[in-house]
Each structure stands twice: as C-alpha cells, then as structure tokens.
Image (cartoon, grey):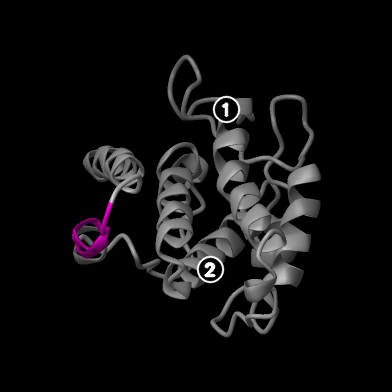
Amino acid sequence: MKKLFTIIILLLAVKSYSQSGSQSYYKRVFDNKGFAKWHGNSISSDQQEFSWGVPAHMEALSLMYEKTKDTMYANTLIRCIGNTIDRRDDLRFTTLNWPAISDYRGESGAAWSTNRYNDTAYIGKPYSHVVHSANITYPMAKFAAMVKHDPAIQGIQYTSSGRYSGQTYSVIAYDLIQKIKE
C-alpha cells in the first residue's frame, strides 16, 4: 500500500511539474525508487495486484514516457502490459497454463476478477469490478493513442521478452486496441 501511495503521489507530482521546465529531478526520483523497472512476470495466481497497484504503475510509466520520450519507460510499460493481458481471466490458461477464473456467474471473460472485496475477503467466487478493468485498460489505451499519433515511434521494435517480443510499437498498439475493445 505504501508503494501504491508513493506511485500516486509521484504521478501527481510529475503531472504538475511537467507543465514547466526540466523534469530531470522527477525522472531521477522515479528511476531511483525503482519505478522504471518491471521485475519480470508475476508468478502469483492472486489477481488482487491488478486491482490498484499494477494499473498505477502502468499509468506512471505511461506518463514518464509521454513526458520524456525515453523508450526505456515505453519498453517497461509494454512488458508490464503484456504480463497483465496474459493474466486476464479468460487468457490465463492459454498464456500461463493456469486455470481460467470464472466469476460468480460461472463465466470467464475479458476482465481481472478478484474475491478480495467479498463480504469475507477471499471467500467465495471472484467478481469483476468495472473500476479495475477501467484502471487496467486506461494506460493501455493511452499508450496506444501515443503510438497512433506519433509516426516517429510506430516502427520501433520491442526487443524484450514476453507477449510482445519482436513486435513494433504500431503492431502492439493495434493489439492493445483490440484487447481493450474485448
């Protein structure tokens, strides 16, 4: 929770500071705190991390890329996005060989469900909260829009591992748009 709070404060600071002068101080703080890194794909089957923490991190990376145009942030964001999509309720089996998550209706869809907020936490069927899907897909949509509107970055190739390995930013943006629509 402390890390999430720090990320949110940092987002607000970066956003307000970006309206004036140099951003080197905020970039240095962001990087030194380790927020510019994604420490690999999550191995936890717990979906709670996708409720608030991961979306805040993706939004922070999106803002850092938008303001600095440093592809380090875009590449970290892409890796994080790929892991997040792989963990979607209906894709978990095909991407990670984990059982798909079915919600309280017995359906598995394009969402990130959790049973964290049930009357007794973690007891009962998972539920897909609209706010979580909105938080998760917003940074994806923002990145896709940045790529769509900047021809100079559309041909950049993502060379790291994961879902989007070897694909150009343009192809990744197109896939993100399709996943968001789902």
Residue 182 can be seen, yes or no: no
In this view, the residue in front, 80 or 94, is 80
At x 58%, y 85%, the residue is 159
Residue extending farthest to the top is 119
Left or right: where 21 falls relative to 54: left
Q: Which residue is mark 1?
A: 131
Disc 1 secondary structure class: helix
In the foreground, 44 or 69: 69
Residue 79: which disc? 2
Q: Is residue 118 left or right of residue 53?
A: right
Q: Is residue 134 magenta?
A: no
Amino acid type shown at disc 2: Arg
Question: Could you say which quadrant of the image residue 135 lies in?
Answer: top right
The CA span between labels 1 and 2 is: 22 Å
Q: Examine the rendering and report whether any part of residue 46 can be seen.
A: yes
Q: Which residues are magenta?
A: 21-28
Instruction: Give the vertical position of 3 relative to 64 (above or below).
Output: above
> Mark 2 or mark 1, which is nearer the start of the sequence?
2
| Residue at the image position 57 percent from the left and 59 percent from the top | 81
Q: Residues within 10 Å of mark 1 (few under 14, many from 20)?
A: few
Which quadrant would the C terminus be assigned to in this image? top right
Identify residue type, mark 1: Val
Q: Position of residue 38 (x, y in %)?
A: 40, 66
